[in-house]
Amino acid sequence: MKKNKRLKLNTIDELAAGYKKIKARCRYFGECGGCLMQNLAYSDQVELKHQLVNRAFEKNGLTARLEKTAITVSPEQWFYRNRMDFPVGENAEIGLKPFGKWRDVLDVKECFLLSKETPEILQLVRDWMIAWQLPGWNNVRYTGYVRYVIVREGKFTGERMVIVVTSADASGETGPDAWDDLVRRLKSSCTTLYHGVNPTITDISIPEELHLLFGPQFLTEKINGYTFKIFPSSFFQTNSAGAELLQRRVGAQVHGTRVLDLYCGMGFFTIDFAACGKKSFGVELDAAAIDLARENASLNKVTAEFAAASMEEWVKGDGPAIIKNFAPDSIVIDPPRMGLHPRVLDWLCEQRVAELVYVSCNFEQLAREMVQLEKSYRLVALEAVDMFPHTPHIETIARFEKIKG
């Protein structure tokens, strides 16, 4: 078990000691790494996350505190996720990793996070593997064929995408007949089916190649009236009902009229800013995501500018010229879980833009970076949206104003 995971679990156990325990709904609770708080009432989970956020701020010497009244709870506590990536074991186990055990796969026959149909879909893939004698992946010897089953859903559109990720088929493990059979088995359970290929030994679910087997090439989801096209590897907020609240809360914190949206993905926030009459410019590393952002902006009949670039390169390359020409009065950042590259953090502190809104799915990293940010900015608002019931995670929104002088 990794040290940081062990420390986090110890902290959760310490803080949860005073709460009444309830019977977990899922039979795999305590073994599966997916949910760590399912034995607490949801209201107690929210209070525990409130304490975890403030403990992270205190640990980093910050005076900021999240008020419990500033937490927006998830509209749904069960079946709320719109994506889950299920690893596959060498004996056709399909499920989730046990907590802290990256080598093993826990074969799950029920899960209350994605949708009620999920166990049936996983069983159909198991049956297909057994029928065609397809070995699952061994994460120690780097052998086997079937590696991941990814299920993505449009909670507000009723669409479902399934991606079966395998290793490269160089050994002739399977052929067209097997994939035709998988289509036959799954076509009534999904609207799109892909075969993805990850030829590397790296334990990731992101395929390097994609082969469309059935249905349209994209999934669509509707958030606050906006339509988003989502491709197999596109990042999208994993709680659709929560995403509506998050988009509204972030929009309420942005007071500027010219918004630079960094780490914009497929334009989730950028499109909302533009629809609200703000001049909007989005930057994202993934060029495919930027193409999709432009397409989504057109689909929603809004005008926004986008650029594809690595943020740590952009701030020393095209960024300064774009900043000068675009002249933003607000910067919005929504970085990945590992947070900001040091070069980007330094650059943000150097900017003269009046407002910075930091959206974070990792409050511990936010706290660490706030130590430096508060040398150049003053925190004026802090709130959170619980996008991840039954887990220790929560989405935070911090609004800063530039310190004059």
Image (cartoon, helix red, strand yellow):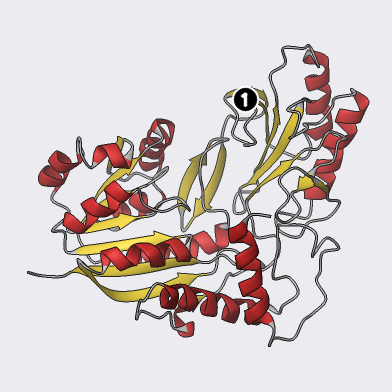
Structural crowding at the residue carrying mark 1, measured as other residues with C-alpha within 10 Å and reported as few (<14), some (14–19) or many (≥20)? few
Extreme right residue here?
A: 131
Q: Is residue 264 above or below residue 357?
A: above
Residue at 70% in and 66% down: 36
What secondary structure is found at the residue carrying circle 1?
A: loop
What is the x, y in percent for residue 144? 79, 25
Q: Nearer the viewer, residue 144 or 303?
A: 144
Q: Is residue 176 above or below residue 186?
A: above
Instruction: Give the quadrant of residue 66.
Output: bottom left
What is the x, y in percent for residue 90? 83, 33
Left-right relation of 99 to 28? left
Left-right relation of 155 to 112? left
What is the x, y in percent for residue 161? 66, 38
Name the residue beneath numbered marker 1.
200
**Quarter of the image containing the C terminus?**
bottom left
Residue type, label 1: Thr
Q: Is residue 288 above or below residue 168?
A: below
Q: Is residue 280 above or below residue 401?
A: above
